[in-house]
Amino acid sequence: MNYRSYFKAEWMSLLRRKQDTLNALLFFVMVITLFPLGVDPSADFLAPAAGGIIWCATALSVLMAVEGMYKEDYNDGSLEQWLTSGLSVTFLVFLKVLAQWLMVVLPLLLVLPLLAQMLFLPMSVLSVVMLSILLGTPALFFIGSIGAALTVSLRRGAVLMLLLILPLYIPVIIFATGAVRAAQMEMVYSGQLAILAAISLVALTLSPVMAAISIRASVN
């Protein structure tokens, strides 16, 4: 096994288990669709709140996607093969998270323009929302991978994982919604986007190492 064959196998595995991706996408659509019905469907309320609604739905969808990221690999012994393959476990974690991110975020971005119309989000602001998702969601996935690795050996680790990683999602949501809000007010939003990119880069650097350590501890 090499890194290229592993990434290809992981991608094919995600395609076979597309129900997990569909569940995250359907949850994203349902939250955005039901929110106006349960609160206030008027444009005066939804337009200013659109960024927050979209990002809360995005964060919850990512949580659904990453919760069982390593469960199947743990149950079928794949994680043990990681440790004995001679390959870098850290880089294998990175490739796994990358495949998950592509599988979830790309469909999400495809349906977002339609959902944005339901929230009366101007098209001029939609590009900022999509850019914030591209820059911010890698951090959510990499942070989530740490929680998933820490709780992979626990039978009921979902709640514990949420408690561990949900507070770490808050800065990403704050800066992402801040960028959207600044765009709506026709203010400069490049600073918030830069911070989002920085958070994702830090998460990309640290989380594969931490997840790899957690995987070793869980398997051993």
Image (cartoon, rainbow, N blue to C red):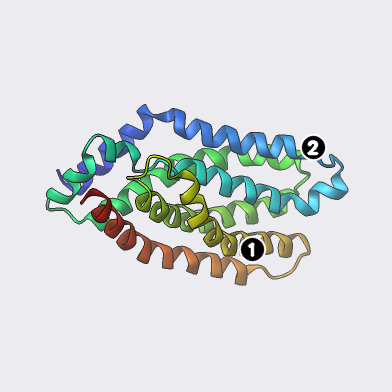
User: For this view, does 170 lie left or right of residue 15?
Assistant: right
Q: Is residue 198 above or below residue 13?
A: below
Q: Which mark is residue 96?
A: none
Q: Residues within 10 Å of mark 1 (few under 14, many from 20)?
A: some
Question: Could you tell me the amino acid type at mark 1?
Answer: Ile
Q: Earlier in the sequence, mark 2 or mark 1?
A: 2
Picture residue at 80% right of the left edge, 47% below the top: 46
User: At which x and y percent is residue 43?
Assistant: 85, 45
Q: Secondary structure at mark 1?
A: helix
User: At which x and y percent is residue 154?
Assistant: 36, 44
Picture residue at 52% right of the left edge, 54% below the top: 163
Picture residue at 58% right of the left edge, 57% below the top: 132
Give the quadrant of the N terminus. top left
User: For this view, does 9 lie left or right of residue 166?
Assistant: left
User: At which x and y percent is residue 54?
Assistant: 66, 47
Q: Which residue is mark 2?
A: 38
Q: Based on the displayed image, in which of its 4 quarters is residue 74 positioned?
A: top left
Q: Secondary structure at mark 2?
A: helix
Picture residue at 54% right of the left edge, 65% below the top: 196
Q: Which residue is mark 1?
A: 174
Which of 64/44 is in front?
64
